[in-house]
Image: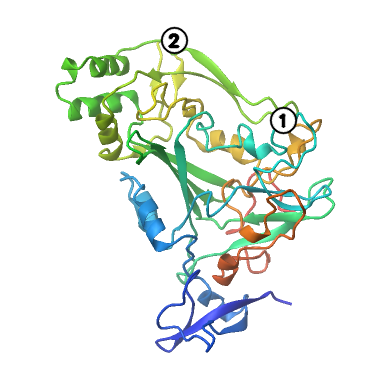
Amino acid sequence: MQPVMMVALLLCNGQVSADSAAGAPPANQVASSDGRTSATQINAAGPLRRLLSRRVRLMSEDREAKLRKRFPNVADAETAKVLADPDLIVYTDDEMPKVYQFWDGMFPGVHDVHYNISAHRGERFGNGNREFPWSAPAGTHRSPNVETLRFMLLPVDSQGNRRPIVWFKKRHWGDRQPGYGWTYPVGTVFGEVLAQLGPDGKAYTFELRTRRRSHGHWEVDVFRPFPTAASLSSRVKSLRPNWQEQPELLRLVKHLDEPHALPLQTLADNQPEEQVFNETMGVDVLPAVSDHRLIGELLTSTVFRSARNDTWRTGPRGELTFAPTTKASFHVVPANYDAGFVAIDNQSCMRCHNSCNRPVDDFNSSRQWYGRIRGSDGIFSFHPFAPESVSYNGFRGSARFRYEFEQAGLFEPFDPKRHPNSVYNELEGERRY
């Protein structure tokens, strides 16, 4: 039997189309006498499935408009088009709280990462999702005052309708019952907008990261106002023509322009059975600049450009780094920024992202921590679970999917007859079941 779902329908210009997502129905929608929109059952796999795709908004229009102002001006037409798309699904941790699945113990279900379900005194968190390298966007785990805005855009089919995400049951060794996995269609775009809070309390975007689903892998890119040391030096000189007369700027420009050794440091996790991240790179610490107005200008008036396959700078012995760091409280990157350890290419990023939806015991089976690493199909931040079905106190619960996604036809059970491998394929090295 084909899956059946409930969807609100409206009559518009003589054609049946789907209701807008959360909130009040559109003005031209017919509502029932009790104020609720009328609904009917339709076959999700039938000819009317194209009517299900519609916009999903997880926050108010005002909040979304405010957050969209953080999108930087990018020197890439395709990325700019994605950022301007009205169908973009925008979210933060408030709308999409960090949760993980746990199916091999006494309290199965979907759990909030901040509640420790372990009874062992030595387990600070009880799950792996608050530890490096899974706790925060790459490079920001030691940086204070960083805020992350995320977005997703699903591709369209030949008829111009958004393709859905597909879900399936996924059981790992030791699970008492199967959990869930999901796959994004080829062409799906995810993004992260990283911003730091300035001394004035405003959020200043310093980086945009994108991931585009391809066949068997994700194509990654990172957009920065200053992909190289030379680009920052040039922009400082442009915005402050008298930079040579200002001791702090003179020191910064000399630091950027003149060659110097980059001290080598190693960033690594300590998992004994499968280490996820271990990298040694040079470190370039930017000197502080007390002219916070200049820092704000640098971040807000500069076009962001792709830093893919770029290096921030290379030292005299061949040591290199992919991004600078600083000890200053406000600079063009946040304090203690560790993105210099991460090359911007598909393989480097997948070192962490291929651990999505895997049991933490894969990495250390001797600890009393529980559950899976959050996410699925190489994306940590997104999940389909309804917030009200998440356990915030450690007790078991029944996992349920978000009504907005199912109602909009953007999340449906995987069916190989309707979801071809050319569009819904596994990541390299992974198996769906």
Instruction: Tell how many labels.
Output: 2
The residue lying toward the viewer, choosing from 43 and 400, is 400
- Answer few, some or many: residues within 10 Å of disc 2's Cα (few below 14, many 20 plus, some between 14 and 19): few
Q: What residue type is labelled 1?
A: Glu
For residue 233, which quarter of the picture?
A: top left
282 w.r.t. 13: above or below: above
Of callouts 1 and 2, the N-terminal one: 1
Instruction: Point out residue 274 in the picture as x, y percentages from the top left corner.
Output: 72, 30
> Does residue 133 appear to the left or right of 225 in the view shown?
right
What residue does disc 2 label?
Answer: 317
Residue 263: percent from left, percent from top: 47, 12
Q: Quadrant of the N terminus?
A: bottom right
Q: Position of residue 12 (x, y in %)?
A: 42, 85
Q: Which of marks 1 and 2 is in front?
A: 1
Tell me the SS state at disc 1: loop
Tell me where residue 85 appears, x and y as whole percent. Answer: 38, 59
Q: Locate residue 372: give its quadrant.
A: top right
As drawn, is 338 to the left or to the right of 114?
left
Q: Which amino acid does label 2 sit on?
A: Arg
Residue bearing the label numbered 1: 274
> Which image quadrant is residue 118 in?
top right
